Amino acid sequence: MEMPASLSIYGNEKIAADILSRIWGKKGVFTCTVANTLTSTIPGISDAGDTPELTMFTPAADAELLVLGKTVCMKGIPINPGGIPTPATLTKAALEISDMPFFIVNGGCKVVPNLPCIEVGGECGNYVTSGKAVSNVREVFNKGVILGQMLSQGSDFVVVSESCAGGTTTALAVLLAMGIIKDNLVSSSSPNNPRELKMKTVMEGLNAAGIKIGGLSNDPLKAIECVGDPMMPANVGIIIGAAKHVPVIVGGGTQMAAVIAAAVKLDPSIIGNIFQGTTRWLMEDPNSNMAKIMDSISADVPIIYVNMDYSSSPYEGLQAYEWGYIKEGVGCGGSSVAAIIQSSGAVTCKDLLDKVHEIYRKIMSL
């Protein structure tokens, strides 16, 4: 295989090349775990919705957009303040181009998508400030492992992703609790990353749970229970269950870094069979540091990112991605990387952009 211009690698290129060689031109399956945390309703924490209250609808709306091509749980489509569309538009483009089968997992939603979901026993997450953020963690994790094993049976690789508003804040909390990072390196769906507010909120949660930074370095499920969100135990389980059998693309940004950290701590044997699939927008974000986070987790979990560029788009809502908005989410990076892999590199970023424009025109007319 020859690395196409649409993709780039960060980290261990030998492991990346080995995994790519095993799945190049093969068939994958895509999963998106949707969940809610009350953390997203804290004013200023999340821009993954036009208002803090609407962030509770974003995961369900993203799932409906992927499956139905329209949203049922709310009017319009999930947008950021300013009318910037959900990254699910790119995910949908990648899934349509690749014709990849996909499933929605309900990790724990307050607003449940109006479509068939795989249930894992999760519930809507509490405020991270409570220090008791997620219930049923071990049950959900165990069901996730089983689901990962099931998904691996009929596919050459599995893509695992998320839609959970407020998730970079809970990711920061879990990464701190595990001692992976000591500073706020997580991203935001806004170019004005509310770093101080996130850190203050997270420290309040860690203090409420009686956890010092690094205090749960060997107990990631406890860290998730105290200060995580309901997407995490499901996806940690899916990754471990699937990666025992087939390669796994962890689709997402700094939010999914906490999931990767927990998964490789619980089962180091999966290293060498997983990589993170994300976007150029995230890797170039000046207000976060995905590379540094991943280096702290493991030097042997590479990042493969898609070189999407919306600067020539006629739509301002899409151009905003080049201005530091959104960057990642709903597995848009992982699904795009997977679409290129499935096509043996025949699918390009231009093909994906053309399809995004087609989908964007359709949903805006709705």
Image (cartoon, rainbow, N blue to C red):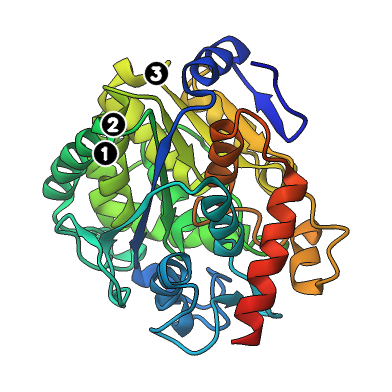
- Where does the image place residue 285, in percent across and percent down from the top left? 72, 47
Secondary structure of the residue carrying tag 3 is loop
Q: Quadrant of the C terminus?
A: bottom right
Q: Which residue type does callout 1 highlight?
A: Leu
Q: Is residue 347 visible?
A: yes
Q: Is residue 249 left or right of residue 34?
A: right
Kindly give the residue lying farthest to the top in the view shown.
14
> What's the distance in space between the residues labelled 3 and 2, CA to CA?
12 Å
**Which residue matches tag 1?**
151
Secondary structure of the residue carrying tag 2 is helix
- Where does the image place residue 340, in percent across and percent down from the top left? 61, 36
- Where does the image place residue 253, in percent across and percent down from the top left? 55, 45
Residue at point 47%, 17% (across, down) = 22
Q: Is residue 73 left or right of residue 200?
A: left
**Contact? badges 3 and 2 (CB < 8 Å):** no
The label on residue 271 is: 3
Residue at point 42%, 62% (across, down) = 164
**Which residue matches tag 2?**
242
Asked if 291 appears above or below 310 in the picture, the reply is: above
Between marks 3 and 2 in the image, the one whose residue lies nearer the viewer: 2
Question: Which of the two discs, 3 and 2, labels the residue nearer the N terminus?
Answer: 2
Viewer-nearest residue: 141 or 99:
99
Q: Are there few (<14), some (14-19), or many (20+) residues within 10 Å of tag 2?
A: many
